[in-house]
Amino acid sequence: MLSLSDFFVKTDSTCYELGSSTGTLTRQLAQRHFASAKWVGIDVEEAMTRKANELLSVSPQHNVSFITDDILSFPYEKSDLIVAYYTIQFVHPRIRQALFDRIYESLNWGGSFIMFEKVRGPDARFQDILSSLYVDYKRDQGYSADEILAKTRSLKGVLEPFSTMGNIDMLSRAGFRDITSVFKYICFEGFFCIK
């Protein structure tokens, strides 16, 4: 994501991270680019924004701000780059298209939306295989069966990923014509879109 941003951030750019959490990615992007580019991290959770601002105060970057707001209703300025790192999957499917529409509209012509998401398999058979591989991966990372099950249950009804084609269809309906995958591992994918 950092390297991709090099193609879109200009000296006068406005850039957003949707679901910025504690601000790590936003700060890394800002450090990589011009001090005159404006970076805004948006998160709906006040505790996340507070932590992001605390971390920012330790190592100030005057072109970075973190805001507690809803990414669906936030008043975006025209921007050259918008990133969402495992965020959109938590937006309710009923309003996800409206969010993609707003992202597309807020980008300048030639701007980019980069989105990394958990994705579903294209059908039940693929989903079963991908889920099994992901459980094996978690076990290889040292997680117990109880921890894996607890995490799965905690995300039920909260995390609602779409398939690769489901995401591409929604991005296309928003107006994006140039969409490609830049990362794929088991059930995780990075989508790279240019307006």
Image (tube, grey):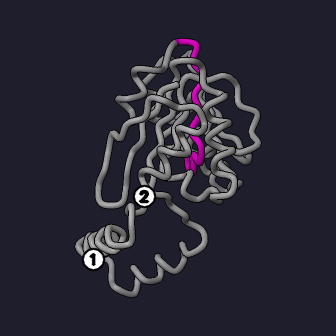
Few, some or many residues within 10 Å of mark 2 (<14, 14–19, 20+): many
Q: Residue at x 40, y 22 (%)?
A: 6
Q: In the displayed image of the protein, which residue is found farthest to the top?
A: 11
The residue under label 1 is which amino acid type?
Arg
Q: Which residue lies under the disc numbered 2?
A: 119
Tell us which disc is closer to us: 1 or 2.
2
Q: Residue at x 31, y 72 (%)?
A: 138
User: Left or right: where does residue 10 sit relative to residue 100?
Assistant: left
Q: Which residue lies under the disc numbered 1?
A: 139
The residue under label 2 is which amino acid type?
Val
Quarter where residue 140 is shown: bottom left
The residues colored magenta run 11-22
Residue 40: x and y in percent read 62, 33
Q: Is residue 57 visible?
A: no
Residue 24: x and y in percent read 49, 44
Q: Residue at x 29, y 72 (%)?
A: 129
Nearer the N terminus, badge 1 or badge 2?
2
Most foreground residue, 177 or 134: 177
User: Left or right: where does residue 109 sit relative to residue 45?
Assistant: left
Quarter where residue 66 is shown: top right
As for residue 188 lying within the magenta part, the answer is no
Few, some or many residues within 10 Å of mark 1 (<14, 14–19, 20+): some
In this rendering, the answer to whether 46 lies above or below 193 is below
User: Left or right: where does residue 71 sit relative to residue 90?
Assistant: right
Most foreground residue, 179 or 145: 179
Count the labels in the image. 2
For the residues marked 1 and 2, what is the alpha-carbon distance in whole angstroms?
A: 20 Å
| Secondary element type, mark 1 | helix
Most foreground residue, 109 or 26: 109
User: Left or right: where does residue 135 sit relative to residue 21?
Assistant: left
Q: Residue at x 42, y 41 (%)?
A: 191
